[in-house]
Image: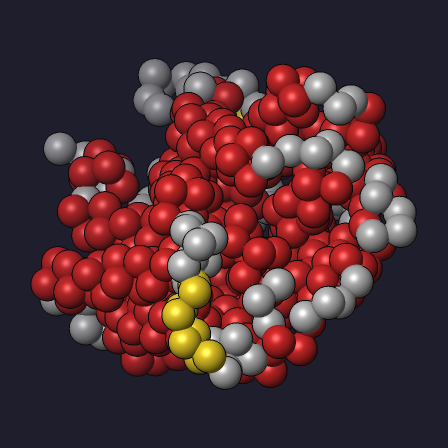
């Protein structure tokens, strides 16, 4: 059996556990997207507040979670390299469970912000440690496939989270008073916390061998290891842009669907389920079949174009079936962008993959922070503007990548050898062309 075959993620039990951890993290995140607008309305400080004020608070609370990931990403990347992926992962899961439970019980706005920030930092620890371990146990040839499975587990969590929140929410329940209380929208948070703790026990047993660090503790974020990979700074900019576009949808679609499309919470949940399902179904096949035809950066360009078309087209219709179709187009684009960018970042890390992936988490979190904040501040008075801005940005990036014609946009060609041996892979494009910064 070849080394490449042994390291495929689907054959490594440890990787399956890591994917389960990411799945659980995204269940909590996806459930929060659905419940948060209703959960915030019970806050005493917002009693009788205008709809615009509530929308802004929802956007800020969503953005604070991403802001914590932005600030914590480089730190937890170094922590994972020095203390080990297992400790970082388990510590992040325990902290995440605690913040989820407390978030569901509090009715204090300052406490909600503090807990949301701590939850984002804990999620960053889990994501960075898990991604670094996946990277360390896949070959460069299998890297995109490993990241596709990574993205699939995330997408499945985004399916299960809204479904869980829709099933468990019970608006008629209202117990307690003051800053701590339990109502019908507390139940999804408590369930998510319990599920996270159960995953901690499972992971602690299955990941018992992961006791030490794998990668060195320093990284050069300026230069990639290969001429076929754009500079890491450029890749981080693309990561931030992709997550910004996705976060505009995730952070503001609930409000847009409720106020402009007159959709119920159940119908909105179905839209998120469609988004997650398409991403889950496409990421692994895309990394296999499409990789035979298009290079990773080519897929990124196509994905950005699809994201731009999908999010812009949401503004052209009020038909629910057509809305679901446009959400599917957006999700298909994200399914191409996310795993390929993750693989390119790991290849662009000159020394420490853990640190590079920490920077990637921060870059993605920057986009996730800006998306809800911008969307929440604009959607109350300019309902269409957040989606229009995001759509234009996605399409512009796709055009910039195509015009830049980076060498990695071109597939490699196998040149024959006179002795009949395995030929080396050679790029068919010149190697001195650089991708323009986004």
Number of on-image labels: 0
Rendering coords of residue 78 (x, y %): 44, 77
Q: Nearer the viewer, residue 41 or 410?
A: 41
Instruction: Determine whether, in the image, residue 137 is placed left or right of residue 348.
Output: left
> Is there any visible trace of residue 66 in the rendered image?
no
Q: Nearer the viewer, residue 118 or 137?
A: 118
- Judge whether 195 appears above or below 269 on screen: below
- Judge whether 222 appears above or below 315 on screen: below
Locate residue 104: give its quadrant.
bottom left
Location of the N terminus (image quadrant): top left
Rendering coords of residue 386 (x, y %): 81, 46
Rendering coords of residue 370 (x, y %): 73, 60
Q: Residue at x 30, y 80 (%)?
A: 83
Rendering coords of residue 200 (x, y %): 21, 65
Q: Residue at x 71, y 55 (%)?
A: 371
Instruction: Determine whether, in the image, residue 208 is placed left or right of residue 316.
Output: left
- Judge whether 418 appears above or below 373 on screen: above
Instruction: Determine whether, in the image, residue 389 is placed left or right of residue 159.
Output: right
């Amino acid at each position: 059996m070849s080394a490449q075959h042994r390291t495929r993620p689907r054959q490594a039990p440890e990787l399956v556990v890591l994917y389960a951890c990411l799945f659980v993290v995204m269940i909590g995140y996806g459930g929060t997207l659905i419940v948060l607008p209703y959960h915030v309305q019970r806050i005493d400080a917002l009693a009788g507040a205008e709809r615009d004020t509530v929308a802004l608070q929802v956007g800020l609370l969503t953005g604070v979670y991403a802001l914590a990931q932005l600030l914590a990403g480089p730190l937890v990347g170094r922590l994972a390299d020095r203390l080990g992926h297992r400790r970082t992962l388990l510590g992040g899961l325990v902290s995440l469970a605690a913040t989820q439970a407390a978030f569901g019980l509090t009715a204090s706005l300052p406490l909600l912000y503090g807990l949301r920030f701590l939850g984002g930092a804990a999620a960053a620890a889990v994501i960075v440690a898990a991604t670094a371990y996946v990277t360390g146990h896949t070959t460069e040839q299998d890297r995109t496939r490993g990241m596709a499975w990574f993205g699939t587990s995330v997408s499945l969590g985004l399916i299960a989270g809204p479904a869980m929140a829709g099933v468990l929410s019970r608006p008629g329940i209202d117990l307690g008073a003051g800053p701590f209380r339990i109502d019908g929208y507390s139940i999804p948070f408590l369930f998510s916390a319990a599920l996270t703790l159960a995953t901690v026990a499972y992971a602690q047993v299955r990941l018992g061998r992961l006791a030490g660090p794998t990668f060195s503790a320093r990284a050069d974020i300026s230069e990639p290891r290969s001429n076929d990979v754009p500079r890491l700074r450029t890749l981080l900019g693309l990561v931030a842009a992709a997550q910004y576009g996705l976060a505009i949808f995730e952070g503001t679609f609930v409000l847009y669907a409720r106020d402009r499309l007159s959709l119920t919470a159940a119908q909105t949940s179905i839209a998120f389920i469609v988004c997650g399902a398409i991403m889950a179904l496409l990421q692994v096949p895309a990394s296999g079949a499409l990789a035979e035809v298009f290079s990773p950066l080519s897929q990124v360009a196509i994905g950005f174009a699809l994201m731009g078309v999908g999010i812009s087209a949401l503004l052209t219709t009020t038909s629910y079936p057509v809305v679901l179709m446009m959400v599917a187009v957006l999700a298909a684009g994200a399914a191409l962008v996310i795993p390929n960018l993750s693989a390119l970042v790991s290849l662009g890390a000159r020394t420490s993959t853990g640190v590079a992936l920490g920077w990637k988490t921060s870059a993605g979190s920057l986009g996730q922070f800006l998306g809800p904040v911008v969307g929440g501040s604009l959607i109350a008075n300019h309902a269409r503007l957040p989606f229009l801005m995001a759509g234009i940005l996605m399409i512009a990036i796709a055009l910039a990548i195509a015009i830049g014609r980076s060498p990695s946009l071109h597939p490699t060609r196998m040149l024959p050898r006179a002795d009949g041996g395995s030929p080396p892979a050679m790029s068919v494009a010149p190697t001195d062309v650089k991708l323009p910064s986004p």
